[in-house]
């Protein structure tokens, strides 16, 4: 991913067809599970924040309109409890370093898979229309 802006994340969110809505608790849990498929490029030593938490916050921020690492960090600091992480909020430089190192294709696959699964769940939950009137 690009180190100067979250453009690859913006593209991944756009191409996956994520709806521009806030994530509730259920959506956050499902998205965290999907993001667990994205390999963490960081070395184990010195990790302060989990990769899935960073990615969840970044995706939530982008859906809310964030277009820079600073905006992502600012949004994350004020995120609703459903998408906030335990402990301190990652700094903008943390978002930048992590998003620059993440495998963009793996992130794209995880987001797309989550969107498709979510659509299937919604279709199953939709009541059948009655033809009789």
Image (cartoon, rainbow, N blue to C red):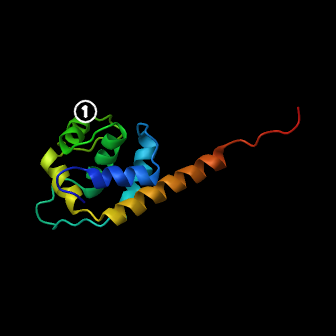
User: Would residue 113 appear left or right of 85 to someone viewing this image?
Assistant: right
Q: Secondary structure at mark 1?
A: loop
List the residue tagged with mark 1: 78
- Whether residue 93 is visible here, answered yes or no, is yes
Q: Position of residue 94 (x, y in %)?
A: 15, 51
Residue at the spot 49% in from the left edge and 52% down from the top edge: 115
Q: Position of residue 126 (x, y in %)?
A: 67, 43
Asked if 112 appears above or below 92 in the picture, the reply is: below
The correct choice, above or below, for 129 with respect to 107 in the image is above
Looking at the image, residue 94 sits to the left or right of residue 1; the answer is: left
Confirm whether residue 91 shows in the render: no
In the rendered image, the residue lying farthest to the right is 132
Pick the quarter of the image with the N terminus: bottom left
At 21% from the left and 62% from the top, the residue drawn is 101
At x 56%, y 50%, the residue is: 119
Based on the displayed image, in which of its 4 quarters is residue 86 positioned? top left
Question: For the image shown, how many numbered marks are present on the structure?
Answer: 1
On-image quarter of the C terminus = top right
What percent of the width, then of the height, locates residue 67? 26, 41
Q: In terms of depth relative to the viewer, which is nearer, 103 or 121?
A: 103
| Residue 132 image point, x, y percent | 88, 36
Q: What residue do we see at 82% from left, 39% from top?
A: 130
Mark 1 Cα shell of 10 Å, populated few (<14), some (14-19), many (≥20):
few
- Side (left or right) of 51 relative to 125: left
3 vs 102, nearest the viewer: 3
């Amino acid at each position: 991913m690009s180190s100067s802006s979250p453009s690859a994340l913006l593209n991944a969110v756009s191409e996956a067809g994520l709806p521009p809505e806030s994530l509730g608790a259920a959506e956050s849990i499902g998205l965290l599970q999907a993001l667990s498929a994205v390999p963490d490029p960081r070395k184990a030593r010195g990790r302060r924040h989990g990769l899935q938490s960073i990615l969840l916050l970044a995706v939530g921020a982008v859906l809310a309109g964030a277009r820079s690492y600073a905006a992502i960090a600012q949004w994350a600091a004020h995120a609703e409890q459903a998408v906030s992480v335990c402990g301190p909020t990652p700094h903008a430089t943390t978002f930048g370093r992590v998003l620059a190192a993440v495998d963009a294709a793996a992130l794209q696959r995880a987001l797309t898979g989550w969107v498709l699964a979510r659509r299937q769940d919604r279709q199953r939950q939709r009541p059948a229309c009655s033809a009789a009137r």
